[in-house]
């Protein structure tokens, strides 16, 4: 992992700012932030509410646009992409996991995964993705028949099934209890280790940092500190 | 200080302003129709009565051949008679000049000094004739306007066989002649029938009626039954050739106006409730969904400690506010639309003034229905949502349960991709909602289709009357029954191709207490120039000895084929005939009764007499033919079919029938409102799913498919239902429009349904486009972070 991190950066962010609103009401969510992220790491973004971590995630995930600065993804400039190109970027390279799962209630777990594999360029089998998150047995259940943790695992399966280059997780355990939360984090860590997918996790839970290769501390729209961790813990050993 | 909940209310209202506006629009249109139509009807009716009252229109008319003035006193002294007067009434022909057909006219006497005691006139221009003048007349304004005649002009008039040159000194309107219909014709036409007034002495000289009268007018004491006086008048004046006294109800002009207003009234009572009902239904659906969307907030409010009643009140306020805003806007618009329509009708009915009247009931109904629908929609959902514990709202909502739904999509799983499955599963998961949208759109389409059918029904009525039934070019009417050889004279004229005799006698038809004062028309056994047709448009032959009734007449008299009917003929020796009804005919104009002409002649004891003739002519020799007919003695008037057709089309386009265009517009707007709302709701409910799809890398088109696919299916399902509903609705609307003056046939044309389907498809496409724009503006991040 260490060796990978020193070789290819997956994201290079330079002087990135994001301002919401104008004039005196303007809110500076990001203030000229610089960051380089190596490929294949599990990165945790920590910081209080409003510190800019989600904003960064949204911009490098192609969900939002920067006010200024540049984001390079594997040599392509995300900030210069059209809506169509951003859609293409999300489709081919990015997986998302949100706090509230955002599953399609009208599709079964399997079909929710299939929703993505149908349009992805190089997907894995939906069954395989579900097996990866430990839900092979529940693949034909509708979201209403699954617990919160299971729903989140389906969301992860759906996100990784396309074999994304990078997986973005915004408060993936925010709505879950500790046991379920740990199980979900374990899945994320497995995805990172077994598939080599770069995983970015935005969270409030400082404990999560223990399992990361790299922890980025946010405050007031900028990075306060980046801590590399050579000996990440496994999800099961995290103190909640 | 505005309570925080009320502030929330106003802000919520602002947030959903687009949707709220659309709902208010639909409900407003329903109320508009209601208020407009009832206001119009009330105004017209009040105006009519006020006009009659102010110009002292008689309650009973007693026509006689010639009666001495003293006889009038006998009737006038009856204590039930409030006022009485006599006058002279004569038939005249106006010669409009070379190359034109003579115009029928009615001459009426004015007292030698002042204005009439009864049946006064409203002098619109100029002055009254001088007392002693023998050649000054006041002309009916409508005719003067239609013919471009002004005071100062002269008219060549034939009265009682002698030609006179009469000078017009004034123009007048009269409540007696709101409509002028030449005797024997059905469609009023201002240009083809004139009324003029002269001083009595001059008119008496022209008609040899010095010291006598030929019509008596009676105003009755309030509460007097006109029939009692009619009987007395008939008895008293029988020796003087009384042709049958009649009440105001049977005065042709009044009958026409009353029928037109009745037609409007029945439109006002059938059509707006349909509109309002559909609007209310839509309101119910939309309100239910709005409250559904607020589910989580309801839970939160309860968690804060608001009571169930407070929360319900809050949401009821929201929906009732929308309904009330719509109803208020609809009422205001309805009042001004009713006003505008009334002004339009004022010209049409030739009222000199208008008495604006509003119907308070219509407001109450409009508001009550709007509020009721909104409350029911709101309550149905609020009640359901109350089952939620506040804690439920604090957690992310459980996904809707699709596991117990019949999996339609699963059946086709091999051919369907996931987005298609999402569309199908959602529809089968919420059949109620889907049904609501389908029925709503179908109702909108039914409104459009049926209004279109009614609109084309008017055209069909004209075509049937003047192409299928009446195949003549011209009708000639005589001043009195003439021998049948006159028909030969006509046929010998240059340009006449075919002739067909016509005998028309005034008659009262009776079946028990159901009576109808109209005419009995004698026609050949198999009329060719003016055919009588049955319901299937097949020609009917007249069987000797029986009577054939127009369908509306059969309805009025409540008789069917085979029943017996009393017919009191009011002409000649005045026989009372007891006749079997041999057939019921489809007619679109008037409510005539037909009899075989020879049988009628025998019954009247006047065989071989005719009162008119139908002709087909060679248009090349039209001018010489007109001259020849003008020179014929005893011609009371000539009508060209083309003129009658134009008059009918005008009548339908300017009269109550014109409301059909307003209805068409409202139907189109309602249809659009329904479709757009359905699309908006679908969007609002799915924005989160759509955002998820976009985040996963679905293009706008792909995500749009999930949203619009649903709308497309709902629209497709609505179309066949709309066709069915439209069929029923058409009958209801036609029932409202038809009067016994004209009937609107129900003819279903594929093109009308095509147009209605097209309208729905266009509405769906436009709505889809508008919603689609929202999809492109969808804020992915916030849509995903909100909980639902």
Image (spheres, rainbow, N blue to C red):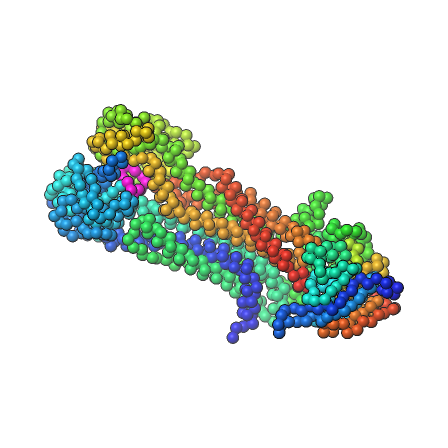
Q: Which residue sits at x=77%, y=70%?
A: A46
The image shows residue B12 at horizontal and vertical percentages of 56, 65
Rendered image quadrant of residue B502: top left
Q: Which residue sits at x=54%, y=72%?
A: B3
The image shows residue B619 at horizontal and vertical percentages of 33, 30
Q: Give the mark count.
A: 0
Check residue B190 for magenta coloring: yes
Left or right of A221? Residue B674 is left
The dominant secondary structure in magenta is: loop
Query: Seen from this angle, which residue lies furthest bottom?
Result: B1
Residue in the foreground of this view, choosing between B374 and B498: B498
User: Is the residue B548 above or below the residue A148 in the image?
Assistant: above
The image shows residue B95 at horizontal and vertical percentages of 23, 38
Left or right of B202? Residue B289 is right
Q: Residue B446: in sight, yes or no? A: yes
Q: In the rendered structure, which segment of residues is drawn in magenta?
A: B182-192
User: Is the residue A16 above or below the residue B267 in the image?
Assistant: below
User: Is the residue A67 above or below the residue B399 in the image?
Assistant: below
The image shows residue B573 at horizontal and vertical percentages of 20, 32
Q: Residue B581: in sight, yes or no? A: no
Q: Which residue sits at x=51%, y=38%?
A: B750
Residue in the foreground of this view, choosing between B383 and B569: B569
Check residue B113 for magenta coloring: no
Left or right of B63? Residue B749 is right
Q: Which residue sits at x=13%, y=39%?
A: B208
Task: Classify the position of the C terminus of chain B by image quarter.
Answer: bottom right
């Amino acid at each position: 992992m260490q060796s990978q991190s020193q070789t290819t950066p997956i994201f290079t962010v330079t002087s990135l700012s994001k301002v919401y609103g104008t004039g005196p009401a303007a809110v500076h969510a990001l203030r000229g932030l610089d960051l380089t992220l190596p490929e294949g790491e599990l990165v945790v973004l920590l910081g209080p509410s409003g510190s800019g971590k989600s904003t960064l995630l949204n911009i490098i995930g192609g969900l939002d646009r920067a006010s200024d600065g540049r984001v390079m993804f594997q040599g392509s400039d995300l900030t210069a992409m059209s809506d169509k190109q951003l859609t293409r970027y999300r489709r081919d390279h990015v997986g998302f996991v949100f706090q509230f799962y955002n599953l399609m209630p009208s599709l079964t777990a399997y079909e929710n995964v299939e929703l993505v594999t149908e349009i992805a360029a190089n997907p894995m089998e939906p069954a395989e993705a579900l097996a990866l998150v430990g839900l092979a047995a529940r693949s034909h259940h509708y979201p209403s028949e699954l617990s919160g943790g299971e729903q989140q695992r389906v969301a992860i399966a759906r996100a990784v099934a396309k074999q994304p280059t990078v997986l973005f997780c915004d408060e993936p355990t925010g709505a879950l209890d500790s046991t379920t939360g740990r199980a979900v984090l374990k899945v994320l860590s497995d995805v990172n280790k077994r598939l080599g997918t770069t995983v970015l996790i935005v969270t409030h839970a400082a404990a999560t940092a223990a399992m990361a290769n790299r922890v980025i501390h946010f405050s007031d729209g900028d990075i306060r500190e980046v801590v590399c961790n050579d000996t990440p813990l496994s999800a099961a050993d995290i103190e909640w | 200080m505005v309570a925080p909940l009320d502030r929330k209310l106003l802000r919520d209202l602002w947030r959903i302003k687009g949707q709220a506006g659309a709902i208010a629009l639909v409900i407003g249109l329903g109320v508009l129709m209601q208020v407009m139509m009832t206001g119009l009807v009330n105004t017209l009716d009040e105006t009519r009565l006020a006009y009659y009252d102010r110009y002292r229109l008689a309650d009973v008319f007693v026509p006689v051949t010639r009666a001495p003035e003293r006889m009038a006193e006998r009737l006038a002294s009856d204590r039930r008679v409030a006022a009485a007067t006599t006058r002279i009434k004569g038939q005249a022909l106006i010669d409009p000049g070379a190359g034109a057909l003579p115009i029928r006219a009615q001459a009426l006497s004015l007292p030698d000094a002042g204005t009439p005691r009864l049946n006064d006139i409203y002098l619109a221009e100029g002055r009254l004739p001088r007392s002693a003048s023998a050649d000054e007349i006041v002309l009916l304004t409508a005719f003067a306007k239609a013919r471009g005649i002004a005071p100062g002009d002269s008219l060549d008039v034939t009265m009682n066989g002698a030609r006179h040159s009469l000078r017009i000194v004034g123009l007048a309107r009269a409540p007696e002649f709101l409509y002028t219909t030449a005797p024997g014709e059905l469609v009023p036409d201002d240009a083809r029938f004139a009324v003029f007034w002269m001083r009595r002495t001059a008119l008496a000289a022209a008609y040899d009626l010095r010291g006598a009268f030929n019509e008596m007018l009676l105003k009755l004491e309030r509460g007097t039954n006109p029939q009692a006086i009619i009987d007395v008048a008939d008895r008293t004046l029988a020796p003087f050739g009384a042709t049958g006294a009649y009440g105001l109800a049977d005065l042709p002009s009044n009958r026409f106006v009353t029928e037109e207003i009745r037609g409007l009234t029945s439109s006002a009572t059938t059509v707006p409730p349909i509109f309002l009902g559909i609007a209310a239904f839509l309101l119910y659906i939309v309100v239910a969904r709005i409250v559904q969307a607020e589910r989580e907030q309801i839970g939160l409010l309860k968690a804060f400690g608001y009571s169930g009643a407070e929360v319900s009140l809050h949401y009821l306020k929201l929906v009732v506010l929308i309904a009330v805003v719509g109803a208020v806007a609809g009422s205001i618009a309805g009042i001004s639309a009713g006003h505008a329509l009334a002004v339009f009708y004022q010209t049409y009915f030739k009222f000199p003034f208008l008495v604006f009247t509003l119907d308070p009931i219509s407001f109450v109904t409009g508001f009550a229905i709007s509020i009721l629908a909104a409350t029911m929609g709101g309550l149905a959902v609020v009640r359901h949502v109350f089952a939620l514990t506040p804690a439920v709202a604090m957690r992310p909502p459980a996904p809707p349960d699709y596991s117990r739904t019949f999996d339609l999509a699963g059946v086709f799983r091999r051919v369907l991709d996931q987005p298609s499955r999402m569309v199908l599963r959602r529809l089968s998961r919420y059949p109620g909602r889907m049904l609501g949208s389908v029925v709503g759109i179908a109702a909108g389409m039914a409104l459009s289709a049926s209004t279109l059918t009614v609109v084309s029904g008017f055209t069909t009525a004209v075509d049937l009357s003047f192409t299928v039934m009446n195949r003549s070019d011209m009708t000639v009417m005589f001043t009195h029954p003439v021998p049948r050889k006159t028909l030969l004279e006509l046929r010998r004229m240059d340009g006449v191709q075919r002739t067909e005799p016509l005998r028309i006698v005034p008659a009262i038809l009776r079946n028990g207490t159901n009576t109808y004062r109209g005419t009995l028309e004698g026609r050949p056994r198999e009329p060719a120039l003016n055919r009588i047709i049955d319901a299937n448009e097949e020609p009917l032959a007249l069987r000797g000895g029986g009577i054939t009734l127009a369908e509306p007449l059969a309805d009025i008299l409540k008789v069917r084929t085979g029943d017996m009917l009393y017919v009191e003929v009011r002409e000649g020796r005045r026989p009372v005939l007891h006749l079997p009804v041999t057939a019921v005919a489809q007619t679109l104009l008037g409510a005539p009764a037909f009899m075989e002409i020879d049988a009628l002649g025998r019954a009247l004891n006047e065989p071989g007499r005719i009162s008119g003739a139908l002709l087909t002519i060679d248009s090349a020799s039209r001018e010489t033919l007109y001259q020849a007919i003008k020179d014929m003695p005893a011609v009371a008037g000539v009508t060209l079919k083309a003129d009658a057709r134009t008059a009918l089309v005008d009548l339908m386009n300017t009269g109550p029938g014109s409301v059909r265009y307003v209805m068409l517009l409202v139907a189109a707007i309602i249809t659009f409102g329904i479709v757009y709302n359905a699309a908006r709701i679908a969007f609002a409910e799915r924005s989160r799913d759509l955002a998820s799809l976009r985040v996963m890398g679905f293009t706008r088109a792909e995500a749009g498919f999930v949203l619009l696919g649903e709308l497309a299916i709902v629209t497709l399902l609505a179309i066949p239902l709309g066709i069915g509903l439209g069929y029923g609705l058409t009958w209801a609307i036609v029932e409202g429009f038809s009067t016994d003056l004209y009937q609107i046939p129900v003819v279903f044309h594929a093109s009308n349904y095509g147009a209605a389907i097209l309208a729905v498809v266009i509405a769906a496409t436009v709505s889809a486009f508008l919603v689609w724009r929202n999809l492109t503006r969808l804020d992915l991040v916030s849509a995903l972070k909100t909980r639902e």
